[in-house]
Image (cartoon, grey):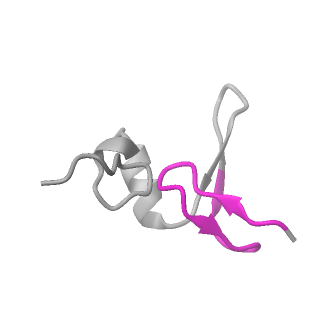
Amino acid sequence: METRDCTFCGSQIEPGTGLVVIQNDGERVHLCSSKCRKNADLGRVSREVEWTEATPEDEEE
């Protein structure tokens, strides 16, 4: 069994968990949780959300 990466936050998804959304253009979107699904549906960019792995680390305060 292979693990997949969440399209929104970048975390590992265990086999048998998560959600796969097929968009109108045929692209598969793998989401690990309802938190990622809701943020993606709202149109948020994962780079701008602090808790994702896609957040740039050079923006230290």
| Left or right of residue 45, residue 18 in this image | right
Instruction: Report the side of 31 relative to 34 (left or right).
Output: right
Main SS class of the magenta portion in the image: loop
Residue drawn at (65%, 68%), measured in percent from left and top?
Answer: 13
Residue sitting at 34 percent across and 46 percent down?
Answer: 56
* Residue with the most extreme left position: 61
Residue 29 figure quarter: top right
- Residue that protrudes farthest toward the top in the picture: 25
- The x, y position of residue 55, in whole percent, is 36, 49
Q: x, y percentage for residue 61?
A: 12, 54
> Between residues 61 and 14, which one lies in front from this camera angle?
61
Q: Which residue is drawn at 36% across and 40% down?
A: 45
Q: Where is residue 6 in the image (x, y as percent from the top left)?
A: 58, 56
Quadrant in the picture for residue 14: bottom right
Q: Point out the stretch of residues depicted in magenta.
A: 2-20
Q: In which quarter of the image is the N terminus?
A: bottom right
Does the stretch in magenta take in 4? yes
Task: Give the residue displayed 57% in from the left and 49% down from the top.
Answer: 7
| For residue 1, above or below residue 20 | below
Q: Considering only vertical position in the picture, is 57 above or below 25?
A: below
Residue that lies at the very extreme toward the right in this rendered image: 1
